[in-house]
Image (cartoon, grey):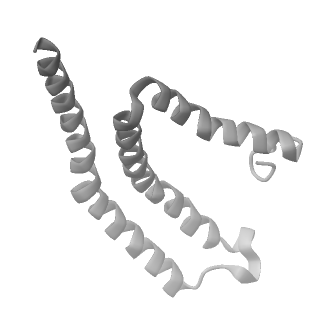
Amino acid sequence: MEGFLSIRMRPWLRRLVTRAMAIVPAVIVAALYGEQGTGQLLILSQVILSLQLSFAVIPLVQFTSEKAKMGVFTNSALDEGAGLDHRHRDCSLKRLLAVPDAQGLNNSAQMSESKAAQSRRF
């Protein structure tokens, strides 16, 4: 957090804040929606992480390819090309695979709600 963001924080406080940001939403979902909600949250989190990976790879390849910042550790042209190729393939696959998964998650949640409504009628 200190690097490019220039945020200085005591290590124990940084750990507490970052862990709370990760755990508190999961605890709330588990308390409100039970096991089924937790399973759907897990699937949704994996879809989101999958989509976010491209946004981490793109700046990483660009950053490590800048000689002014990396000096002698700059990526070679071959490494940069491989990173860009990976980025394009990854983004294409995400559009083909992850987006329909996210839409399917929404459909399964709607089906679960309708089943629950039907069971309440009887």
Quadrant in which residue 89 is drawn: bottom left
- Measured along the vertical axis of the image, is residue 19 above or below residue 119? below
Residue 1 vs 30, above or below: the answer is below
Direction top: furthest residue: 121
Where residue 52 sits in the image (x, y, percent)?
A: 46, 52
Q: Residue at the right extreme?
A: 10
Q: 121 or 61: which is nearer to us?
A: 121
Quadrant location, the C terminus: top left
Q: Position of residue 14 (x, y in %)?
A: 79, 42
Identify the image quadrant of residue 60. Answer: bottom right
Q: How many marks?
A: 0
| 119 lies above or below 58 | above
User: Which of these two is toward me, 41 or 53?
Assistant: 41
Q: Residue at x 17, y 15 (%)?
A: 120
* Residue found at x 51% / y 78%: 80
Relative to 90, residue 55 above or below: above
| Residue ID at (48%, 54%) | 55
Residue beneath the point at 25% across and 41% down: 105
Residue 109: percent from the left, percent from the top?
A: 24, 33
Tell me if 93 is positioned left or right of 60 in this view. left
Can you give x and y, in whole percent of width and height, for residue 82 in the image? 44, 80
Is any atom of residue 105 visible in this view? yes
Please state which of residues 25 and 70 is positioned toward the viewer in this rendering: 25
Q: Residue furthest front?
A: 122
In this orientation, does residue 8 appear?
no
Viewer-proximal residue among 60 and 44: 44
